[in-house]
Image (cartoon, rainbow, N blue to C red):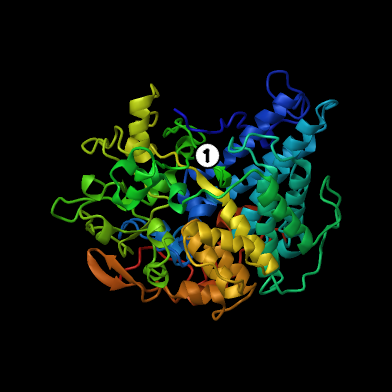
Amino acid sequence: MAIAGLFAVGLTSCEDFLDSKNYTEANTSNYPASAADLNAELAALYGVMNQFATDPLQSPWVVNYIMSDDANGGGDAGGDTEAHAICQLMTNKENLFDKAWHNTYVGIARANAIISAVDAFDWTGQETTRNQLLGEAYFMRGLFYLWGVQFWGDIPAYWAAAAPTPCPQQSAKEVIMPHILADFVSAANLMTHGATTRGDGHATKGAAEGYLARAYMFYEGFYMKAGELANASLADVTFDFTQEGAGTSLSKAQVVAFLEDAINNGGYSLVEDFRLLWQYTNMYTIQSYDFVADLKAAGKTWAGNNNSEEMFQVQFMNSASWNGNIGMGFCNQGSLYLGLRCDDDGNGHENGGPETKPFGQGWGQGTINANLWDDWPDSDPRKKATILNAPEECEGFVFVTSTSEDAGYYNKKWMPITCDDTNWANHKDAYTWWGVYRKNNTDAANNNGDSFQGDHFADVILLRLADVMLMHSELTGTATYMNKVQARAGVPQTGYSWTNIKNERRWELAGEGLRFNDLRRWSGQNGGENCEAAKAIGRKAGSRVVYRQQWKVMKHAASSWEKRYAATDGFLAIPPAQIRATADENVLKQNPGWGADVADANMTTTPVY
């Protein structure tokens, strides 16, 4: 089955290696001994992204999406408390983000191990290979630290082969963010364009350049409270440490130059039609999906995984199972979570059958908030290319008995997709279009035994060229690249203004998990209840939803979204088990706005409207 993926080999990795000599197991005294050893470690490092994917409600892409004003928690009215807690900026249980914390530090440990061991053997004649591998490790360390900082702010941090004991919290603003920026600079300078095959799952020079801009803009916007970056006077970020390829400082001009290099020399291009980015235009579904009939007539189909616009992604393959370290992380569980809500309407009618084709059944979480639909002009073709208005577009759609926070709007970019040959009677066999492809074209087994839950293999796109182009316009105050994105979308091209670039990012990137941190950086740290992020997310209150088949309006479970955002600044609770294990506030303490003594931080049941 032609699904690109990464085999997460060597999963014991360096964080578990022994320090004494051992003749039967790999350890720090005998490993790595070759480039092949380091490549095995690099595969294990990339595999951590699939570990995140095992639980979408602990993955940065889904959590940030649900916390934003794009989405509601959705799901089951009685049982999906996790999704509702994330939406409400609250917590429903102590271990809500334990796996996210664990995976973050597994990734950091594996990246540190590679960086520290890269010169354990002679690379003579293989310097380009060495630099590419090292650059990828720097990229991944920067990525995991960026996710950690955006989730929890000040976190324990180290950059050596092994963590010190104790390993105290560091200032994200003063210490960790400069290291993150240096990691992406090192990655960009060490890697070369074309050193790896685009879309093979490896980080590239262009991806490092794009993520450098993303991290830089978050640092300057959120931590330094720079406001409109195009017109802000930004001091260089200095690096008071030595790191290969990083230099001693980073300027805004350098970030812009890196972006221009990615755009012009990275080998990426915008997919010609916005709809071709999303799997509902696949070879099977396009045959009978009226919304894309014009694409079918023109002989065009889905650009596919690893397409020309994708710059970095989480990849999957037909190896998912309910067992093992990664298990179902080898398939895109986010698609399952964001599918049409299962169950029925009390009269035996359910979603996800031929009546709602091509949109498949799932858990109904992460539904689109009604405000996004209402705010978005109908004249923008991306609106209906991104949002499924299920009652309007799917004649057989029903609000089921367990409906919660569902206005009938779903995220087309991530939903499970069906087609004419779907086995409607047996969801375990060829239920999604991927399952149909597998059954019709390969001898591959349905490894997880359940097509409904496991046949989801569309990439999670973490970075694409349109985003990079919009970051360039936002940093420079120029419209050239924003206009290219608008032209591809088929909307009028506008001049640069802060309002225009904010709107363009909202429409182009809606539902992709970027909006929450955009709002945070536009608001600045300690923005309070009246900042842009708090007010935007606060508009969830009063938005229309269906709760148990009755139209209601959303309300906060304890106080308000504005109060919760102001209290937390958008940071999550550090897992309490970590704090108890440390038992020293000088080493690790809870973030503001969280804890058992915070009246509006904890919820035990789903909101009742």
**What residue is at 21 percent from the left and 37 percent from the top?**
425
421 relative to 94 in the view: left or right: left
Secondary structure beneath dot 1 equals loop
Between 361 and 26, the one nearer to me in the picture? 361
**What residue is at 43 percent from the left and 44 percent from the top?**
333
16 relative to 52 in the view: left or right: right
**What residue is at 65 percent from the left and 55 percent from the top?**
146
Q: Can you say whether 526 is above or below 587 in the image?
A: below
Between 146 and 573, the one nearer to me in the picture? 146
Q: What x and y, as percent, mark residue 229?
A: 69, 70
Q: Quadrant of the N terminus?
A: top left
Q: Can you say whether 283 is above or below 257 in the image?
A: above
Q: Amino acid at mark 1?
A: Gln
Q: Answer with the quarter of the image where residue 301 lies.
A: top left
Q: Answer with the quarter of the image where residue 45 lies.
A: top right
Q: Answer with the quarter of the image where residue 17 lies.
A: top right
Q: What x and y, as percent, mark residue 357?
A: 27, 47
Whether residue 166 is visible to the viewer of this picture, yes or no, is no
Q: Residue under circle 1?
A: 315
Whether residue 81 is visible to the viewer of this picture, yes or no, is yes
